[in-house]
């Protein structure tokens, strides 16, 4: 009778040579841990940084997987005008992109543009939802109005846009020139909005052809998206002289096909997008252009690329030049007198304030185009709506102090860009939907619709987020949360530009954009911050073999064995695993 | 594709089971898990006394799904030679005999047995997982402990005063068919080397850097990153030597400064700036030597 011994699997005979008969699975090493890993998808910083509220990471990831149609639909679900924003958006998403300091931000705008152009050749993905009986009026067909109408149509409402101009598009048509935004790109995006059932009535000015009161009686809700179209005056002597005109008026003429004679030397006053578009358009009409700006290059509010292009095309820049007077010869402007400025203390915007030096100089001018900003004409039609000189005041969902009146875009006191207008239009659409459905959500509900602290998501509002998210946490994944060792450096695709001589010779699009193939490659540069791509890195590096992959690609951590080392979280390329304290 | 697709190159399925007794974040079981992916089930492991003896589990358990022979500290290659002979007698030429052993068991006490086996060109695969001290018995220095490191026998006032032995050169000097370095930060490189070694006959040697959180005084989640830094700062270059003559780097080495690598480990916390510069100078000199050796690769006929 051999000796016996009692082990974890019961009493057994002691063999001549000690030989293992079971695995270590009987030892629950999970009890050792004091931190535990969990899969938590988080929010990519690009998503949080996009004023429109686009799931950029989401569609880039779909593109990486070759699911082009789904990517396009996800983009279109949040942004009605991708061919437009891909061209003219100042792309703050790229400033927050986690790839920025590694080897250059993902060229999100270029991918968006390629997607927008692809979407043009494709019927609009109209939603088959419940139709609603209420009708909503939108006043103004700029990006804010188009976005509000588009999302409302997708929510099931009948929508009519009233537009005072002869064609829809707002500043996209009246302000931004064709060499930056070809009209077929704009028309394609607008056609998709119309295909959603939105009716656009052009040539109707509310307050003139139809009163605001009538509008509020005819419709269940109204969104005011009338923009900011009044050029600010400089308020200096000689501003009334022939030859001095608001840049916006000039751009509207050029954009409607006119080719005014500006003379030889044109001076543009200002440093924003309007100023750059005036300068570049004037050069295309054969003028020699000088831009006078009272601050410095770094402080210019214009999109950086536009300033670069204006310089490349030959515009001369005089910085720290503040206009004090226009001089006259033969009943027309002949020169601008400016005072040399110096940089002083920072002002409210944080930029150093220009202060006068007392030194004056003259710049010769046959025409002067003023572009120091636009204000909205709050003409008193809705005089009881609260606002100030800088625009109407709205809440987080575009609501004004009047129950059924919503507003968005340049007419409000918020940031004035195409993306901000599109985001505001979406917020107003959700606000109107909530109002008409008597839905009273709290702040937490609203915050759950945001990409972290970014804009609202329409797909989340409709409960149709197509992206599978693992225990999502609505917080941004920072650059320190990523593991760059798992990535290769791949240079960013640069936008190909027309050479300056050709660019200056006409109104052809200057930025030729990426080919579809290049754009798809660029999409693959995305690190997919915060969202698990099922890359297996965590599983490969777990020293305790505690992670397994299921048939659907999802992962399970055997917490009975996981010792909480944190290697999975440390090695995850994209910060999709979070370690939490297990015991105090 | 911007992410390195390591998943495509790492075989599925593990012959290492959970519940093993390694410390949290220990690189040794990770190294074993990856090596066994390349070797497969037709493998016999010979294991002299080391941390992995414990990791493998107490009787009657085992964390390895292949046979393991626990052997006396100095005898790994001798036992492996015997097992090889027994297998060959039975015609089991395809079974890999793997000696899996620590740095103490390789650089110090096992060196004569290893040298003898290599001299005879025994048909075995020898993997030294190097955590740079006798960890299992409480962090005593070995001849693999780097210059300047703290251990319990080389306290911070009198840190390790000799350079780490160049074990790869020692083994290459035996003119064995294959000698290489590897580490857990580069699973694909590790698996490639083990796969290549598996297909060869004769003595094959892999020197595998294996970070040890308690012994190196680093965070449990830092081992892989430290292994990566060791490679990229050229502290532990990734190499292959065939027939003792053809030296080859198996990846690019960025040549990052060594200081961040040292500063992340408590065992180097006491080092002065001068001592760090000394270490850097040694690394640079060794690198130059390697550059020359690898440059000769082209001159040596295969
Ligand atoms: C020259 C220029 C270049 C610009 N470049 C850029 C750029 O590159 N990138 C960028 O992000 N932003 C740019 N902007 C800013 C951007 O165009 C605006 O922020 C954006 O268009 C605002 O959208 P919106 O819908 O609020 O208003 P708008 O686009 O101004 O549209 C308002 C519409 O309402 C109509 N309307 C007004 N009153 C009435 C009424 N009573 N009844 C009916 N219709 C009415 C107007 O005719 C207009 O079509 C530029 C602006 C200008 C002027
Ligand atoms: C002859 C002999 N001396 C001492 C020991 C005690 N001992 C067991 S493991 C070990 C340390 C092994 O160090 P190393 O080979 O570096 O492996 P590690 O534990 O560090 O993984 C020692 C000294 C022993 N088992 N046999
Ligand atoms: S890498 Fe991709 S997901 Fe991350 S911020 Fe940039 S675009 Fe967004
Ligand atoms: S790597 Fe493995 S053991 Fe470590 S925390 Fe992650 S799941 Fe747990
Ligand atoms: S390592 Fe890869 S598979 Fe694991 S959580 Fe991160 S992204 Fe997902
Ligand atoms: Mg050791």
Image (spheres, grey):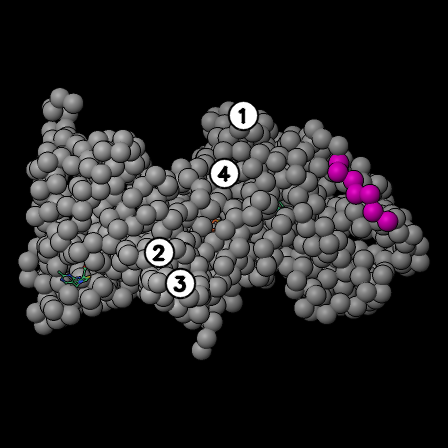
Residue A40 coordinates in the image, percent (x, y)? 54, 59
| Nearer to us in this view, A516 or A494 | A516
Disc 3 is placed on an element classified as strand
Residue highlighted by disc 1? A505
Residue highlighted by disc 3? A12
- Which secondary structure is most common in the magenta stretch? loop
Label 4 to label 2, Cα distance in Å? Answer: 49 Å
Sequence order check: which comes first, mark 3 or mark 1? 3
Residue at image location 35% in from the left, 56% down from the top: A20
Q: Are marks 4 and 1 on the same chain?
A: yes
Residue highlighted by disc 2? A20
Whether tag 2 and tag 3 are in contact, CB under 8 A, the answer is no
Mark 4 vs mark 3: give the one in front: 3
Report if residue A567 lies within the magenta region. no
Residue highlighted by disc 4? A524
Report the span colored magenta: A124-130
**Which mark, by number, is residue A298?**
none
Disc 1 is placed on an element classified as loop
């Amino acid at each position: 009778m051999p000796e016996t011994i009692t082990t974890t699997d019961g009493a057994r005979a002691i063999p001549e040579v000690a030989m293992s008969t079971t695995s270590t699975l009987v030892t629950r090493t999970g009890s050792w841990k004091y931190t535990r890993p969990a899969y938590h998808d988080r929010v990519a910083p690009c998503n949080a940084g996009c004023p429109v509220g686009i799931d950029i990471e989401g569609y880039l990831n779909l593109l990486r997987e070759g699911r082009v149609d789904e990517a396009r639909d996800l983009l279109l679900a949040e942004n009605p005008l991708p061919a437009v924003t891909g061209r003219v958006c100042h792309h703050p998403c790229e400033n927050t992109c986690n790839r920025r300091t590694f080897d250059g931000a993902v060229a999100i705008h270029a991918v968006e543009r390629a997607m927008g152009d692809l979407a043009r050749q494709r019927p609009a993905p109209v939603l088959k939802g419940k139709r609603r009986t209420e009708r909503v009026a939108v006043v103004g067909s700029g990006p804010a109005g188009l976005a509000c109408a588009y999302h409302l149509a997708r929510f099931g409402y009948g929508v009519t846009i009233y537009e005072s101009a002869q064609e829809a598009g707002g500043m996209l048509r009246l302000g931004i020139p064709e060499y930056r935004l070809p009209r077929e790109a704009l028309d394609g995006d607008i056609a998709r909005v119309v295909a959603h059932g939105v009716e656009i009535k052009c040539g109707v000015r509310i307050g003139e052809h139809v009163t605001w009161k009538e509008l509020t009686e005819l419709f269940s809700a109204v969104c005011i998206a009338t923009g900011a179209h009044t050029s600010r005056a400089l308020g200096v002597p000689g501003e009334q002289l022939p030859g001095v005109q608001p840049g916006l008026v000039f751009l509207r003429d050029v954009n409607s096909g006119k080719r005014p004679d500006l003379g030889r030397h044109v001076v543009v006053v200002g440093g924003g997008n309007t100023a750059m578009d005036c300068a570049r358009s004037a050069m295309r009409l054969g003028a020699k252009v000088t831009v006078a700006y009272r601050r410095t290059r770094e402080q210019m509010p214009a999109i950086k690329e536009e300033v670069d292009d204006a310089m490349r095309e030959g515009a001369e820049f005089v910085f720290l030049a503040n206009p004090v007077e226009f001089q006259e010869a033969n009943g027309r402007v002949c020169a601008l007198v400016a005072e040399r400025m110096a940089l002083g203390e920072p002002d409210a915007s944080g930029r150093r304030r220009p202060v006068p030096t007392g030194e004056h100089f003259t710049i010769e001018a046959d025409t002067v185009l003023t572009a120091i900003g636009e204000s909205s004409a709050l003409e008193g039609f809705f005089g009881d709506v609260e606002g100030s000189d800088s625009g109407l005041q709205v809440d987080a969902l575009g609501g004004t102090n009047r129950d059924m009146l919503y507003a968005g875009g340049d007419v409000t006191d918020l940031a004035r860009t195409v993306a901000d207008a599109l985001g505001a239009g979406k917020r107003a659409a959700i606000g109107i939907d909530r109002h008409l459905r008597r839905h009273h959500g709290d702040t937490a509900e609203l915050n759950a619709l945001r990409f972290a602290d970014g804009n609202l998501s329409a797909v989340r509002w409709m409960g149709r987020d197509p992206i599978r998210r693992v225990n999502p946490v609505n917080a941004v994944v920072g650059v320190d949360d990523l593991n760059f060792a798992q990535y290769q450096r791949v240079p960013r695709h640069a936008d190909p530009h027309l050479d300056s001589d050709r660019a200056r010779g006409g109104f052809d699009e200057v930025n030729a954009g990426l080919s579809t193939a290049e754009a798809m490659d660029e999409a693959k540069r995305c690190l997919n911050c915060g969202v698990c791509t099922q890359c297996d890195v965590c599983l490969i590096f777990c020293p305790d073999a505690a992670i397994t992959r299921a048939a659907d690609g999802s992962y399970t951590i055997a917490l009975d064995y996981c010792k909480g080392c944190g290697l999975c979280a440390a090695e995850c390329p994209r910060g999709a695993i979070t370690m939490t304290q297990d015991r105090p | 594709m911007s992410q390195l697709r390591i998943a495509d190159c790492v075989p599925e399925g593990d012959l290492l089971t959970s519940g093993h007794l390694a410390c949290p974040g220990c690189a040794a079981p990770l190294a074993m898990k990856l090596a066994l992916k390349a070797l497969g089930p037709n493998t016999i492991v010979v294991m002299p006394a080391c941390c992995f003896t414990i990791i493998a589990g107490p009787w009657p358990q085992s964390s390895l799904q292949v046979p393991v022979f626990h052997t006396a500290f100095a005898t790994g290659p001798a036992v492996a030679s015997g097992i090889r002979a027994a297998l060959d007698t039975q015609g089991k030429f395809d079974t890999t005999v793997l000696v899996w052993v620590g740095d103490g068991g390789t650089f110090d006490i096992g060196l004569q047995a290893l040298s003898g086996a290599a001299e005879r060109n025994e048909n075995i695969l020898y993997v030294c997982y190097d955590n740079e001290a006798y960890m299992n018995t409480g962090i005593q220095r070995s001849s693999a402990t780097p210059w300047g490191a703290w251990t319990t026998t080389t306290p911070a006032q009198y840190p390790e005063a000799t350079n780490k032995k160049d074990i790869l050169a020692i083994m290459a000097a035996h003119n064995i068919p294959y000698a290489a370095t590897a580490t857990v930060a580069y699973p694909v490189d590790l698996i490639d080397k083990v796969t290549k070694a598996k297909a060869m006959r004769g003595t094959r040697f892999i020197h595998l850097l294996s970070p040890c959180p308690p012994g190196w005084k680093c965070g449990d989640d830092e081992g892989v990153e430290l292994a990566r830094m060791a490679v990229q700062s050229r502290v532990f270059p990734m190499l292959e030597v065939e027939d003792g003559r053809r030296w080859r780097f198996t990846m690019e080495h960025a040549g990052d400064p060594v200081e961040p690598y040292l500063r992340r480990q408590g065992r180097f916390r006491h080092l002065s700036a001068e001592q760090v510069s000394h270490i850097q100078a040694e690394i640079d000199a060794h690198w130059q030597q390697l550059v020359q050796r690898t440059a000769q690769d082209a001159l040596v006929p295969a």
